[in-house]
Amino acid sequence: MFAKNLFVPKTKLLAEKELAALAKGFRKKAGKSRAQAAREMRVSQTSIFNAEESPVQSLLKLRVRMIETYSPFRVIGPVFHVRKKSRICKRPNLKLLKKAKVIAFLCDS
C-alpha cells in the first residue's frame, strides 16, 4: 500500500534573495511606480531600487513591508532549525587540550 500525505503545507519557504523578486513583482502588479512606492513606504527611491534589484543588500525589512503592502500575503520568519543536543553536561570539567591548544568543556558524567 502507498501512504499519501494529507497535510500539504500552505506556506512556502523562500530564501532571503527570493524576496527581492517577489517584492518587485507585487509592486508592479499593484500598478505602483518606484516613486509612488517610495512615498508610501517613506523611504528614498534608491532604497526601493536596491530592495528589488540588489538581493545581496540587507534590506529585508523593506522587502517584507513591500510584499505585505502590495500582496495578500504575510511574511513570517526568519526560520531557525533547532536540533536536540546529544547529552547535557551536569558537571562540566574545564580542561586544556594540549595538541589543539584550545579550552574545551568535557563531561564527567
Image (cartoon, helix red, strand yellow):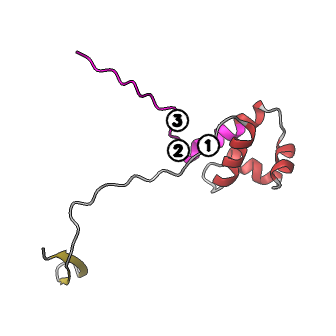
Residue 50, numbered label: none
The type of residue carrying mark 1 is Leu
Indicate whether residue 2 is drawn in magenta.
yes
Q: Are marks 3 and 1 in contact (CB under 8 Å)?
A: no
Indicate whether residue 109 is drawn in magenta.
no
Can you say which quadrant of the picture contains the N terminus? top left
Question: Quick one: SS at disc 1?
Answer: helix
Q: Name the side, left or right, on which 2 lies relative to 30.
A: left
Task: Give neighbour class at mark 3: few <14, some 14-19, many 20+ (Cα, 10 Å).
Answer: few
The type of residue carrying mark 2 is Ala
Quickly name the residue at label 3.
11
Q: Name the side, left or right, on which 79 lies relative to 102.
A: right
Question: Quick one: SS at disc 2?
Answer: loop
Quickly name the residue at label 1.
19
Quickly name the residue at label 2.
15
Vertically, is 49 above or below 96?
A: above
Q: Position of residue 71 (x, y in %)?
A: 71, 35
Q: CA distance from mark 2 to mark 3?
A: 13 Å
